[in-house]
């Protein structure tokens, strides 16, 4: 991490840790390593829009909550788990962003402790 801004490391750092676009589109025939996201250039809007619609339609057919609006209650009270409220042991992004630095550090310590115990 300390070397991320040295010489030619910036590109490698961004490929590994950088923020990505919402959509990715690659020409795997000409760029099999998939390093050049064509969605960033708006060169193939019809193809990209077609794939987006195809994905939405597929998610609708499987009643995906991201499309249907049926919330997380289904996942927290799944019959497979005996209708028990499943505790994830972690926090959502919205909660995390509102925590103080000290609260975040305490949560991370708890999580690390839990992980160490369950090795």
Image: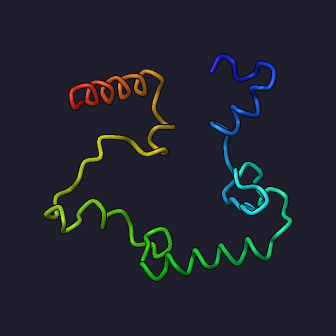
Left or right of residue 109: residue 69: right
Query: Is the N terminus in the top left, top right, bottom left or bottom right quadrant?
Result: top right
| In the image, residue 95 above or below residue 84 | above
Q: Nearer the viewer, residue 21 or 72?
A: 21
Residue 21 at x, y = what percent? 70, 53
Residue 89 at x, y = what percent? 29, 41
| In the image, residue 44 above or below residue 31 | below
Name which residue lies at 18% across and 68% down: 79
Give the colour scheme of this rendering: rainbow
Name which residue lies at 80% across and 25% down: 8
Residue 6 at x, y = what percent? 77, 18
Name which residue lies at 45% across and 72% down: 69
Residue 58 at x, y = what percent? 52, 79
| In the image, residue 34 above or below residue 3 | below
Name which residue lies at 69% across and 31% down: 13
Q: How many marks?
A: 0
| In the image, residue 48 above or below residue 117 | below
User: Which image quadrant for residue 85?
Assistant: bottom left
Q: Nearer the viewer, residue 64 or 46?
A: 46
Left or right of residue 20: residue 7: right
Query: Is the C terminus in the top left, top right, bottom left or bottom right quadrant?
Result: top left
Left or right of residue 86: residue 13: right
Question: Residue most toward the left?
Answer: 82
Q: Nearer the viewer, residue 14 or 86?
A: 14
């Amino acid at each position: 991490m300390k070397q991320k801004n040295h010489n030619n490391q910036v590109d490698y750092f961004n490929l590994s840790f950088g923020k990505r676009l919402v959509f990715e589109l690659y020409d795997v025939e000409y760029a099999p390593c998939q390093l050049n996201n064509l969605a960033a250039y708006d060169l193939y809007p019809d193809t990209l829009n077609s794939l987006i619609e195809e994905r939405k339609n597929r998610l609708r057919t499987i009643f995906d909550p991201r499309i249907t609006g049926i919330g997380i209650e289904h996942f927290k009270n799944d019959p497979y788990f005996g209708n028990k409220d499943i505790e994830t042991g972690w926090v959502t992004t919205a909660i995390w962003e509102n925590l103080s630095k000290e609260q975040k550090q305490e949560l991370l310590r708890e999580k690390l402790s839990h992980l160490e115990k369950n090795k």
